[in-house]
Amino acid sequence: MTASTIDTMEFRKALGSFVTGVTVVATTQEDGTPRGFTANSFSSVSLTPPLVSVCIGKVASSYPVFSDTSHFSVSVLAEHQKNVSGVFASKSPDKFAQVDWHKGVTGSPIMDGAAAWFDCETYQVIEAGDHIILLGKVVNFSTSSASPLGYCRGGYLTFSLSQDALAAASSARVGAILESHGGIVMLEGPDKVFHLPTGTKLDPASAPDSLRGVLSKLKIDAQLDFLFAVFEDAEAKAGAVHVYYRGQVIGDLPQDSAVRVVPLDAIPWAQVQDEAVSAMLRRYVKERREDAFGVYVGDANTGSVQPLAKSA
């Protein structure tokens, strides 16, 4: 494929597979009024000097203001601030009246309760096709313990659910649904029963009973992307919880007789004897085909799937 044959919509969809944070970029206009918009194009650039960047489309209504501003702020939104993201992604004329904010040292508005924020002086404006890259020199910043709000494939992601569940559990099983070459990685036991890679906790890789430790022992290099399911084990002691992530194998799998790549349309359901895992995998197959994932929360028998909240 060449640049001249790239399908713009498919290209945009592919870019949407990259998980980002959600920010509000804001400045103060010449008349003193605040101006801001929601963006997920924020990135770090340099430590010395401390530089960050934001991309702004030339067709955006905020483009004339930000292309000529001398200062701006970037507020990294926390999980509880989906409403703030929605406000600044809208065309509402009174966005700043709907949120709590304060001014930074440059005069730029900063969102209260953000996971982190950066107050910047404009360092450089770079032409980049149908966008500009706005480089900012950070003059002040702050961070908090709040979990950041994530964004991928048109929906919001939250990261604290699995941490909260594991913290409250008296025992746990932490597993992964890993994709590789069009199938998922399963382990075949000597009794011909198939199961997913699991541990009693997520980290560290040096712990043989952790999920990353199990993967390390199997010589499986994997990237864990998203939380997929959190459910209590109704048959185990109180407080037992299962947490499963979805992800992908990086590179080749080891030549291990127990490691199998099972095509999504050929999972040996009769040999997946854990009913809760079987039900979870059936949902995974369905949502993979529809390319519409959610997070299951409940117990092994009843619960609900919380879909990714669509952006405003």
Image: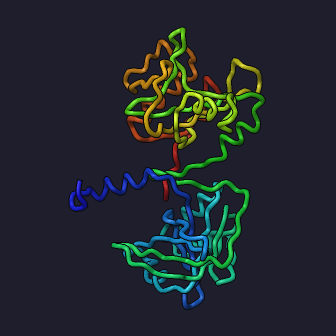
Residue 64 place in picture, x, y as percent: 43, 83
Q: Determine the residue located farthest toward the top in the rendered image.
A: 191
Q: Is residue 264 left or right of residue 228?
A: left
At x 48% / y 18%, what residue is drawn?
257
Quarter holding residue 173: top right
Residue 198 place in picture, x, y as percent: 61, 27
At x 52% / y 13%, what residue is drawn?
193
Q: How is the image coloured?
A: rainbow
At x 60% / y 88%, what residue is drawn?
32
Quarter holding residue 224: top right
Q: Is residue 83 above or below residue 291?
A: below
Q: Is residue 102 above or below residue 165?
A: below
Number of disc labels = 0
Residue 88 place in picture, x, y as percent: 54, 68
Q: Determine the residue located farthest toward the bottom in the rendered image.
A: 31
Q: Is residue 41 above or below residue 60?
A: above
At x 44% / y 72%, what residue is drawn?
56
Residue 207 place in picture, x, y as percent: 70, 33
Front residue of 245/303: it is: 245
Front residue of 272/84: it is: 272
Front residue of 220/263: it is: 220
Front residue of 100/279: it is: 279
